[in-house]
Image (cartoon, rainbow, N blue to C red):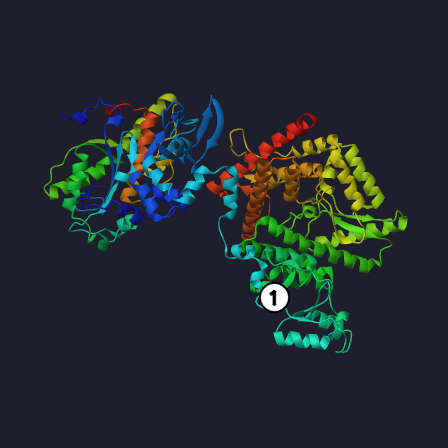
């Protein structure tokens, strides 16, 4: 076990990479990653200056019209973008030494793992913090204080508003990654999480 | 950012969709002062170093025990409170900055900053801040005081006309003056004018006279006089001249108030040229003249029905042209006076000649020349003879004047301070004024606050005896104290910690800001013996008399201008949107800069109110 995986260390001693993907659809086997947005949380602060965003060029399937309406990335937009393999190397280099921070993690992780298999990359298996799970945890805590509290929305926009953060309706990988990082800071504060184990 | 990476991190900002969702920190900052003054490259610098923090409720963000502070904070969401010795000083809201005094001084923060609510905060490191301070507009925001901030607010949004109206009138002179000798005939004068292509000619007399093409038409041709008539039969003498260095705005007011179309400009005692209203017309400021002409020429007051709409359109144009609200008010009052005069003249024509001398006066904001868009009527009649016949005549005259003004869309005054009820002989007015001064009961103070700002707009009866009563009140401390206490009933809607007290979803700019200043200015102006009714003149006079400090007078004047401007803009917006015009501005329509200026204004008023209360011990009396 490497040093950073020690779950007892203080939460702000770890780097979190908030990450969001825009994809051509919802099926990790057939759909492709179109763009990646990443924002780090280091020493408890979102480091906006260290953000990353890129479109991804990958062979094969293009967006279904439905998905196109959501993220508005046209097939031509990705033509001059870095290749999937390059992007994965870049992303994995970062999350290898950090904690991955995702809103509704299972989907994005399945996409990343499927892409890793396609280009024969090793999946770095980082520790993952899922803001949707933290929402569930906060809800349980609220129930202890007050029976039948109002449910917390699980969508990114709804959850942010429920926690008093500015509304958000971006569907852009970088904007969503930032929205996730901010939501994480708010949830961390409400849960009074001190160590990594309080968050994973 | 890694130089060798295939990933372009700046692309995200440019490609970000969802305009109008200010989630990107840069998007948010771009619309909040002082960041709104920064160019793109400066915003990029911020984007490279910005950090985002979250502060839980009641957590300390900055503390006086911190040795230094090395970043600027901007509130993205939430409210923070500034505290010293456990005393709350102020609340700051979304879009506001803090931490800069310690950042600039390099010393410990002078206050504790605590999250009043959960806060999302942007942090800009000192190195970046120092770079941004090289931008003068950005730096000015942090180093200036309240007055400077307010003054700058008045100067923002330069429009096409701002510079022009401040420029000297001589700029309009494009040729030297044309003149004739006093023994010239009108035909000779007409030839000189025709050759020079001008519409007026000066006559070399002492003092100089002027002959215009209007004079040739009205005083020569219309009267059937021959072309050999000497110019002395048709000229205007002495001519109204204006210093060539006067501003175009001053010239506009000069021409409107004196009803002249030609103004010779004088430099070192010499006439250097003649400018006309057509010269100003070229500068697009035609409409006040047009409206004035249509008032004067309207055959009957019924033709004034469209006046309110024309006035609103005109005011809109003047605001767009860069006139401030106080300047607009001065022009509007000239036009309103013309309407009053027209209406009074028509009523006289209907009723027959008046049995004695009289005066129609306006009071309240109209008396102070501080009215912009149409509000309630404030007028009264004063006549000389204490006879039954005069009483009957002027009561009827008052009724007709008020009725005609209602038709011209001046609503009735809710308090009934109008010529149909307030119609008395001069002697009775005098004793009423005197009684208000010597027995300042609540009702008397209401009367004093309304009528002591009176101004004659029509009639030949001198109102100096009433002025003398008011001048006599300057030494009456008891009266002034009561007047001060009465004015202090209007309080700015600002809570203890600089938060707005929001009534019915909005801030009443008149009750909360304008009237308190008017009341303060009236008291200190009366004490200083100031004869002008305008609040800004009164504050100036009080400063000259050593009653109020320069900072106080200046700060209050700036606040007064700002509140007038904000109210006028809000009213024009309402008018354009077809909503009723009011004095209340919804809080959500104010951007953070306006909120800040409004708070500054209210804080300034509160400060002077406290000073005034102490000066007259007015709270005790109230």
Q: Residue furthest front?
A: B268
Query: Looking at the image, which residue is at 74% across and 56% down?
Result: B341
Q: Quadrant of residue A163?
A: top left
Taking depth in this image into account, of A102 and B601 the one nearest to the observer is B601
Q: Residue furthest left?
A: A120
Relative image position of residue B302 (x, y in whole percent): 72, 60
Q: Is residue B507 left or right of residue A51?
A: right
Q: Quadrant of residue B113?
A: top left
Q: How many marks?
A: 1
Q: Residues within 10 Å of mark 1 (few under 14, many from 20)?
A: some
The image quadrant where one finds the N terminus of chain B is: top left
Taking depth in this image into account, of B542 and A131 the one nearest to the observer is B542
- Badge 1 sits on which subunit? B
Q: Is residue B13 left or right of residue A33?
A: right
Taking depth in this image into account, of B184 and B499 the one nearest to the observer is B184
Residue B311, compared with residue A33, is above or below; it is below
Q: Quadrant of residue B294?
A: bottom right
The image quadrant where one finds the C terminus of chain B is: top right
Relative image position of residue B357 (x, y in whole percent): 84, 53
Relative image position of residue A172 (x, y in whole percent): 29, 45
Taking depth in this image into account, of B191 and A192 the one nearest to the observer is B191
- Report the residue marked by disc 1: B278
Check disc 1 and report its element: helix, strand or loop. Answer: helix
Specify whether residue B481 is in view. Answer: yes
Q: Is residue B421 left or right of residue B600?
A: right
Specify whether residue B31 is in view. Answer: no
Relative image position of residue B73 (x, y in whole percent): 38, 34
Residue B127, compared with residue A144, is above or below; it is below
């Amino acid at each position: 076990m490497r040093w950073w995986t020690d779950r007892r260390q203080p939460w702000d001693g770890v780097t979190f990479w908030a990450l969001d993907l825009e994809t051509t659809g919802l099926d990790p086997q057939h759909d492709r990653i179109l763009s990646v947005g990443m924002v780090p949380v280091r020493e408890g602060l979102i480091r906006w200056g260290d953000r990353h965003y890129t479109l991804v060029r990958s062979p094969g399937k293009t967006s279904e019209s439905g998905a196109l309406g959501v993220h508005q990335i046209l097939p031509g937009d990705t033509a001059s973008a870095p290749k999937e393999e390059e992007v994965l190397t870049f992303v994995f280099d970062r999350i290898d030494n950090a904690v991955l921070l995702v809103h509704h993690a299972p989907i994005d992780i399945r996409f990343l793992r499927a892409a890793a298999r396609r280009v024969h990359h090793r999946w770095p298996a980082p520790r993952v913090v899922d803001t949707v799970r933290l929402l569930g945890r906060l809800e349980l805590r609220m129930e202890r204080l007050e029976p039948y509290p109002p449910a917390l929305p699980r969508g990114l926009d709804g959850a942010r508003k429920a926690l008093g953060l500015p509304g958000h309706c971006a569907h852009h990988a970088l904007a969503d990654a930032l929205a996730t990082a901010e939501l994480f800071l708010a949830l961390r504060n409400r849960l009074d999480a001190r160590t990594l184990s309080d968050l994973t | 950012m890694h130089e060798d990476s295939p990933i372009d991190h700046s692309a995200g900002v440019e490609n970000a969709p969802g305009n109008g969702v200010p989630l990107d920190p840069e998007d948010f900052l771009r619309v909040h002062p002082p960041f709104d003054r920064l160019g793109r490259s400066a915003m990029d610098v911020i984007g490279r170093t910005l950090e985002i923090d979250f502060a839980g409720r009641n957590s300390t963000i900055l503390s006086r025990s911190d040795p230094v502070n090395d970043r600027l904070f901007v509130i993205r969401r939430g409210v923070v409170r500034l505290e010293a010795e456990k005393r709350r000083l102020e609340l700051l809201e979304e879009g506001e900055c803090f931490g800069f005094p310690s950042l600039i001084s390099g010393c410990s923060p002078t206050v504790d900053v605590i999250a009043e609510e959960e806060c999302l905060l942007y942090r800009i490191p000192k190195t970046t801040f120092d770079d941004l301070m090289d931008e003068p507009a950005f730096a000015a925001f942090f180093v200036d005081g309240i007055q400077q901030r307010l003054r700058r607010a008045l100067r923002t949004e330069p429009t096409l006309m701002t510079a022009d109206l401040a420029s000297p009138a001589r700029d309009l002179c494009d040729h030297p003056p044309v003149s004739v000798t006093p023994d010239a005939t009108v035909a000779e004068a007409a030839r000189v004018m025709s050759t020079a292509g001008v519409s007026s000619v000066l006559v070399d007399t002492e003092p100089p006279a002027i002959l215009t093409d209007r004079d040739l038409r009205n005083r020569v041709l219309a009267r059937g006089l021959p072309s050999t008539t000497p110019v002395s039969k048709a000229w205007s003498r002495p001519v109204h001249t204006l210093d060539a260095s006067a501003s175009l705005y001053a010239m506009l007011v000069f021409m409107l108030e004196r009803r002249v179309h030609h103004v010779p400009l004088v430099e070192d005692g010499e006439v250097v040229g003649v400018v006309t209203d057509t010269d100003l017309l070229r500068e697009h400021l035609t409409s006040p003249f047009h409206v004035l002409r249509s008032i004067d020429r309207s055959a009957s007051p019924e033709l004034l029905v469209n006046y309110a709409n024309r006035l609103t359109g005109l005011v809109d144009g003047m605001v767009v042209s860069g006139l401030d609200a106080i300047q607009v008010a001065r022009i509007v009052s000239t036009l309103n006076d013309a309407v009053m005069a027209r209406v009074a003249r028509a009523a006289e024509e209907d009723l027959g000649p008046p049995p004695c001398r009289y005066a129609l006066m306006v009071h309240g904001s109209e008396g102070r020349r501080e009215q912009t868009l149409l509000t309630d009527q404030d007028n009264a009649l004063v006549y000389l003879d204490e006879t039954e016949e005069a009483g009957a005549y002027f009561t009827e005259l008052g009724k007709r004047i008020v009725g005609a003004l209602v038709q011209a869309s001046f609503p009735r005054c809710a308090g009934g301070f109008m010529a149909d009820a307030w119609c008395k002989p001069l002697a009775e007015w005098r004793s009423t004024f005197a009684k208000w001064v010597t027995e300042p009961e609540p009702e008397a103070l209401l009367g004093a606050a309304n009528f002591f700002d009176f101004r004659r707009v029509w009639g030949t009866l001198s109102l100096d005896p009433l002025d003398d009563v008011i001048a006599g009140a300057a030494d009456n401390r008891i009266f002034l104290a009561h007047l001060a206490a009465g004015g202090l009933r209007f309080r700015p809607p600002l809570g203890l910690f600089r938060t707005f007290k929001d009534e019915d979803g909005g801030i009443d700019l008149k009750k909360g800001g304008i009237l308190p200043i008017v009341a303060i200015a009236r008291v200190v102006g009366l004490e200083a013996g100031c004869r002008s009714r305008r609040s800004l003149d009164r504050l100036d006079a009080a400063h000259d008399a050593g009653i109020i400090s320069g900072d106080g007078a200046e700060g209050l004047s700036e606040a007064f201008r700002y509140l007038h401007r904000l109210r006028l803009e809000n009213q024009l917006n309402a008018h354009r949107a077809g909503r009723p015009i009011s004095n209340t501005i919804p809080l959500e329509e104010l951007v953070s800069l306006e909120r800040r200026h409004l708070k500054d204004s209210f804080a300034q008023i509160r400060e002077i109110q406290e000073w005034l209360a102490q000066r007259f011990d007015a709270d005790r009396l109230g």
